[in-house]
Amino acid sequence: MEDQAALRHHAQLFLRRPLLFDDPECHIVLMSEDKPWPDSIHAGECEQHEPLVRRVLAPNPSPYTFTGTQTWIVGAGSDVAVIDPGPTGSGLSIGDPADINGAGHVDAILRATEGQRIAAILCTHTHRDHSPAAAPLREATGAPIIGCAPLALTDDGPRADSAFDTDYAPDRILTDGERISGDGWTIEAVATPGHTSNHLCFGLVETGALFTGDHVMAWSTSVVSPPDGDMAAYMVSLSKLYDRKDRVYYPAHGPAVFKPQQLVRGMLGHRKQRERQILRELEKGASVIPDMVKHMYKGLDPRLTGAAGRSVLAHLIDLENRGAVRVQNDEWMLA
Ligand SMILES: [Zn+2]
């Protein structure tokens, strides 16, 4: 395992990433830095965030997962819920060649919950850094897998084969507003499609905390990659969170967000700004996505060119559905 200094360095490197990747004015990241990154970021350790909420970090840091997937444990009494049990085995960090084996994360969750019954294993969505450990955790504890729907894709898209957990098999699917409860805790599902079509956030009713999965994160904007990723749905899901009065967000990657509405407002504004940029690009005669990415994402880390292209495509599809643009042989133009 890397030592703490190395992990902190890693965290700081990636904290800079969104400045280049997706936010020229830096306001999104700055707004989310109102609380320092916690000192203890060792994978496998259990860290208390508030009386009902603990975190265990999975050992899968990467450009897509930041310091790794954060598994959230909810409850302080006789039973708990485990949110996003994380990766397992290989292929856990979405195409990153520096893939780190996730073996041991299930053991870390079991250690953290010793003496308590796991009443529910909840998954926000089925990317491979979130849901694969649900099956071995169910096997070890008998706890049911409850949460997002499995995803049956008719068109996988370029990243989907490595990113989606097709083995995910829930015992119960939660729809928007449905609740489950245990000893001193109640969790409500909040449907938030966009990053993926099956994405759920989970609200902890007793304390006003919201577990946001990959829908809203402080360290980076969410990857919205068609065909499953849907920009129009993502914007609706952002607005839905803006209308809620949650106290704090606990994302699956990166630090907690203590001014959630400010962050969500910034993200909504940021996406609208990207849309205007794309329309300007089309006005100036750019017609293919690589050219638009080159003009729009100055100083982009070359490893993230593909992700930026998917994001531009998601915007273009949304604009096409609204009649503002059209496409012919992969060349885009104003309608
Ligand atoms: Zn994801």
Image (cartoon, grey):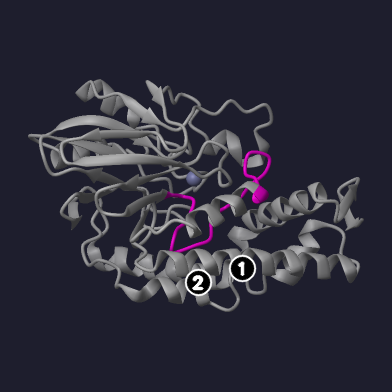
Using the rendered view, name the quadrant where residue 79 is placed: top left
- Residue 4 location, x and y as percent? 23, 64
Side of 54 where 190 appears, left or right: right
Relative to 223, residue 286 above or below: below
Side of 143 where 152 appears, left or right: right
Relative to 283, residue 324 above or below: above
**Few, some or many C-alpha atoms within 10 Å of disc 1 (few <14, some 14-19, many ≥20)?**
some
SS of the residue at dot 2? helix
**Few, some or many C-alpha atoms within 10 Å of disc 2 (few <14, some 14-19, many ≥20)?**
many
Side of 96 where 119 appears, left or right: left
- Residue 224 location, x and y as percent? 61, 50
Disc count in the image? 2
User: Residue at the spot x=25%, y=51% of the render?
Assistant: 43
Front residue of 325 and 104? 325
Examine the structure image and report whether residue 89 is included in the region drawn in magenta.
no
- Residue 102 location, x and y as percent? 33, 40
Q: Which residue is most to the left?
A: 115
SS of the residue at dot 1? helix
* Amino acid beneath label 1: His
User: Residue at the spot x=39%, y=23% of the render?
Assistant: 172
Residue, disc 1: 270
Examine the structure image and report whether residue 231 is included in the region drawn in magenta.
yes
Residue, disc 2: 28
Q: Magenta stretch? A: 213-232
Characterize the magenta stretch by its predominant secondary structure: loop
Q: Earlier in the sequence, mark 2 or mark 1?
A: 2
Q: Circles 2 and 1: CB distance less than 8 Å?
A: yes
